[in-house]
Structures are given as C-alpha cells and as structure tokens.
Amino acid sequence: MTIPPAVRAHAGLILADTIGAIIAGHAQPEVQAIAARHATGGVPLLGSRLAAPPPMAAFITGLAGTACELDEGNYPAGGHPAIHAIAPALAEAAAGDATGEALLTAVVAGYEAGARVGHAMALRPAAHPHGTWGVIGAAAAVASLRGHDAARTLGALEVAASLGLATSATASLRGGSVRNAYAGAAAQNGLLAVDLAEAGITGEPGGIAVVFGQVVGSAFDAARYQASAGRWFILESFLKQASCCRETQGALEAIELLLAEAPIDPAAIAGIEVATFASAATLAETAPAAPIAGRFSIPFTVATRIIAGHAWIEAFGPAAIADPATRALAAKVRVVEDPGYTARQPADRLCRLTLRLADGSRRERIVRGTPGDPDRPLPETAMREKFRRSVVPVLGERWAGLWDMARAPDRLARTAALFDACRPG
C-alpha cells in the first residue's frame, strides 16, 4: 500500500488522538477492573502497568478507547473506524515490536478496509455500528503488520466477516455500557480472524457482502464498494473535543455560542428546545440512567454543560448524572426532529437551539455541523490540548513527549518506545 505523505500525516493525528482516548479510558474503574482480571502477561496495555495476551490486549484497548466517548468517527463510513483498527494494531505491533512506520501503515490499511465496508452497506436501524464492520478493519490492520499480500488479506477478511457482533443501537441510550465493549470485541475478533486464516480456516466466499448486506445490514452496494477504492476515508474523519456522542454536539455548540455572548443563569431558564435531524433527535432522554446514557442524551449534554461549565469526562461521571440541578435542567430540554433538516442530510447536519427565559425573552442559535468535522477541522493546538487533558491524569507531564511520538510514529524505529512512554510511573 502506497500512502501519500498527507494521508500519513493525518493518520498520525488520528493515531495520537485515539491513543489519548485510550489512556483516558484506562482511568475508568470498569476498564481497570477488566484489565486487572486479564493481566496474565503478554503485551503492554497503553496507560497501564499491566500486560495481557495480544487478543485480550486488543479487546481491553478497544474497550478503553470508547469508554469516554472521545474517539474519532467518520460520516461516510457511518461509524468509528479508527478505534477498531488501532486497538488490534497496537496489540500486534507490541507483540512483534514493529516499527512505527509499519504501525501507521497498518492503521491506515485497517481504517480504509473497515470504512469502505461501512460506506457500502446499509446497517439495520436497530444495530449500532461499533463491533459490526469494524472487525474488517481490525483484521486488515493485523494482516498488514504480518506482511500478508492481497490474497491472504482477503482470506482473513472473509473469516472476519463472520466474526462481527449483532449490536444494539439502543443499549447506550438505556444505560447499557456493554456498548463500550463492542469495539474491543471486534478488535479481538479481527486479530483472531487472521490467526484462523493462517491456520487454514476459511471464510465464506463473498461473505463480506452476505453478512453486511443481508445479516447485519439490509443492503450492500457492490458498485459503491468498488468505486471507493483509492478514496482516503481517513481524510474525512471527524474529531471531538467533548466526551459525548457526536450527535449531541450540535446542540452543545449552540449553547457554547450563546454562553460566549452572555452568561446563562440556570434558574432563569424556562425551557430549551432543540430541533435537529432525525437520527440526532432520537437522543432525547431527559433522565439518563447511567453515565453512558448521559453521553447519548442531548438534554443531559446541554444541561451538564450549563451546570458543570464543561462537557469533559467528569461532566458525565456518576456524580454528575445524579446531580439534582443538572437533572432538573435536563427535564426542561425538549428535542424534536425538523423534517427539513433531515431532508438536507447528508450534506448538512443542522441543529437549532432555542432558549426560553423566565422573563419571556428568547435566544436562539442555528449551527451547521460542529468543530472537528472534516469541513471545520480543529487546529493542531486544540487537538494537542485535548490530548493533554486526556493523558495528564495518568502520565502527568510526560504527555508532551508521548504526543510527539504518537503524532509522528514514522520516526520510531521500534514501537517499544511508544509503549514505554505510555506506562504510568
């Protein structure tokens, strides 16, 4: 695979951002608990003193990378390709002490393989994209690190197609943090798929189209899949600054704009209406049952930003979810679909937030997309600051050196240096 320099440079940004999300996730108690349970030795876990066998390391890394809802995503692919490719790539790279160049090549290979399938398929509405086509990206990343040619890689991908998950899109909305395990399971199964293919296990010929067009998905556009060859999906990624679902962040930006104009006194708020496109309008729960449900709730995201003053990790922790003032304000937020906004997708992702105050006045903002979208890229300084906030609680002031390594991995002769830099003191 010949990867243009501009693509490698952007892939380094995606890798660094994802490593930051992984390290932040390792600070979460449930990730620490599962890591401790499976720390039987093997390859190091980023942001931990522990080590686990490569398949379990891939799982734990995928779990950590989605635990705080900070990882990147991709609109054309309809999901989050990076964490599915990066989690197994890190485990495999550590097992073979690959070069940084090989690691980054594998990340791009996995990202593109998974994104192409996501772009070509129609995921069933009840399914969550995590853990589905991401298994293809996971297998492609591992196959790249093992030096497989196109034919052997296709064999591994056909095995991987049958090792994805049947995920639920509503699990997170209802408080099921099992959703955070989806990407980890796909990462683990992608690595397993390559092992199985090397052992002689074969997949269903043409199984990618079957599974993702008829089983997990309702259609697979083969022509669209073929036409996407050579398209660099990784250049179309979106990146986040807040610890919540992307579809909440239109309303979040609208609130930020209103706050930048003038303070908002929570006691003076009579009500808030958010009008947006159909898929975002489903995130309407006013009383989330758990932190993950808060991250997938427009009412809670808006309320916690106003009350807590930010939408970072702590704004969605257990104490924040239970906070009476935040819950009372979230109950005043109404989310509705604007059919006109839905009709303008996928070209536009519109959100209108109307703030009604007790004195009868109204304040309103309409936003298109959100910062970090492909057409509204965040400056490097903002991404570096996000990385710092993600990593400092675990690694302290060593974050800057790690950023430099992760941002430009092609300079690393051995990935062991990256893992050493991620180990807490």
Image (cartoon, grey):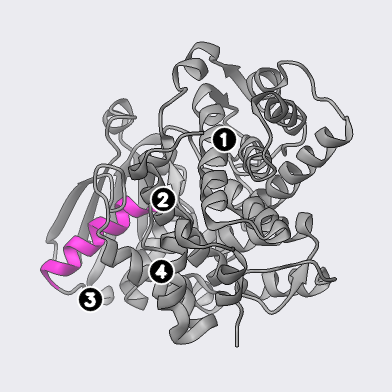
- Calculate the distance from the C-alpha at mark 3 to the C-alpha at mark 1: 45 Å
Is residue 331 in sight in this rendering? Answer: no
Q: Which mark is residue 404?
A: 4
* Residue type pointed to by label 2: Arg
- Main SS, magenta residues: helix
Foreground mark, 1 or 4, reads 4
Q: Which of disc 1 and disc 3 is earlier in sequence?
A: 1
Foreground mark, 1 or 2, reads 1
CB atoms at circles 1 and 2 under 8 Å apart?
Answer: no
Residue that label 2 marks: 246
Task: Please report the residue visible at 48 percent of the width from the left and 76 percent of the height from the top.
Answer: 391
- Calculate the distance from the C-alpha at mark 1 to the C-alpha at mark 2: 19 Å
* Residue type pointed to by label 4: Asp
* Residue type pointed to by label 3: Asp
Give coordinates of residue 105: x percent, y percent.
52, 45
Closer to the camera, 395 or 148? 148
Give coordinates of residue 302: x percent, y percent.
35, 62
Count neighbours of disc 3 (C-alpha within 10 A) and say few if under 14, some if 14 to 19, many if 20 or more.
few
Residue that label 3 marks: 265
Q: Using the image, determine if residue 37 lies above or below residue 173.
A: below
Residue 259 lies within the magenta run: yes
**Label 3: element kind:** loop
Q: Which residues are magenta?
A: 247-262
Residue that label 1 marks: 114
